[in-house]
Amino acid sequence: MSWLVWSNPVAIWWSFMVAVSALNIAFWLLLYGYFRMANQRSGLLRVMVLLCAAYVFGCAFRSFLPRADVQRICLFDMWLSNVFVGRSVATLAEICFAAQWAITLRLFAKFTKSDTVHNISSAVVPLIVLAEFFSWYAVITTDYLGNTIENSIWAVTFLLVAVALLRLLKEFHSAARVAIAIAFGGVIAYLAFLTLIDVPMYFDRWQADQESGKKIFSLLAGLYDVSTRRVVTHDIAQWKDEIAWMSLYFSAAVWSSLALCGISLVADRLHQYRAISTHAGIQKGPHPQAPLGLGLG
């Protein structure tokens, strides 16, 4: 552990990620305790809390034991730093995160009777599962084209989420509209990061590999390599391109997961913020009906 000194930028970055992840876990535990007190029988709460737990703890695991999959680099020489293990944890966590968005959008779709939001909610999880397929392709073969396609699919998915949020803005007023607007802004920022930084980075890596004539692994050779090889490094030159996306991913993305979890707590009060459509225009005020359930209990 001699590398854990303040003169090493990697040590400072890793300490930051560990601290943020510890706070995220503490906040999830507080939410879990509060949710149990608020409504122990709600199926929606139960599902959202479990999905959020998978994402919060999955990202914490990846923060404590960071690794770059295609490069096979990691900070600690232990079997838990194995790329196959880490990618498996990431896959489960990311599908659970997508499910949180799908459930939340489905809740709002049923409440507002919006076909657009309903259709988008149905597309979120299948798109992310497809993205995970390309992620595994990149990890196994070390072909960055897989990462390029993977993150492009994430961009398309959250472009659709942005459309759904924009559609929902006119349906609510007061605090609910502000919350939806904040979520929309966050999604737009994420899309900007994906399209301007993340996807071009992986595309440039793929092009560099093409120009250098790099040979990629076959399926069997790649599976063996991903299960056995790990390169321990604490050199900032090896990590510098990973720091930006990892730092944002394991902080802001986790906060959005926690926020989605919190929405289920106030699901039965959405009618208070409903903007009612009339022939004369839009009239703000309480809706006479409670929100529709999701059939989760």
Image: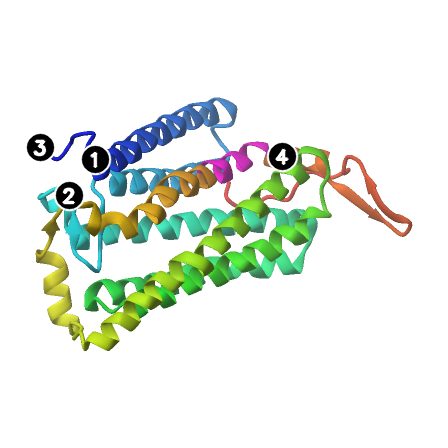
Which mark, residue 103? none
User: SS for tag 4?
Assistant: helix
Q: Over which residues does the magenta segment extend?
A: 258-266
Task: Please name the amino acid that badge 1 sits on.
Answer: Ala
Q: Is residue 110 left or right of residue 54?
A: right
Residue at image coords 33%, 63%: 202
Residue on which the image places disc 2: 234
Q: Which mark is residue 11?
A: 1
- Front in this rendered view, residue 106 or 139: 139
Q: Are marks 2 and 1 in contact (CB under 8 Å)?
A: yes
From the image, tell me which residue sits under label 3.
2
Asked whether the viewer can see residue 133, the reply is no
Nearer the camera: disc 2 or disc 4: 2
Work out how far the residue at label 2 is from the one at label 4, CA to CA, in angstroms.
49 Å
Dot placed on the residue nearer the N-terminal end, 3 or 2: 3
50 with respect to 107 (left or right): left
Compare marks 2 and 1 and give the one earlier in the sequence: 1
User: Between marks 1 and 3, how big is the CA–CA gap?
Assistant: 10 Å
Q: Is residue 257 above or below residue 208?
A: above
Structural crowding at the residue carrying mark 3, measured as other residues with C-alpha within 10 Å and reported as few (<14), some (14–19) or many (≥20): few
Q: Is residue 203 magenta?
A: no
Which of the two discs, 2 and 4, labels the residue nearer the N terminus?
A: 2
The earlier-in-sequence mark between 3 and 4 is 3
Question: Residue at (71%, 36%) from the top-left corner?
Answer: 273
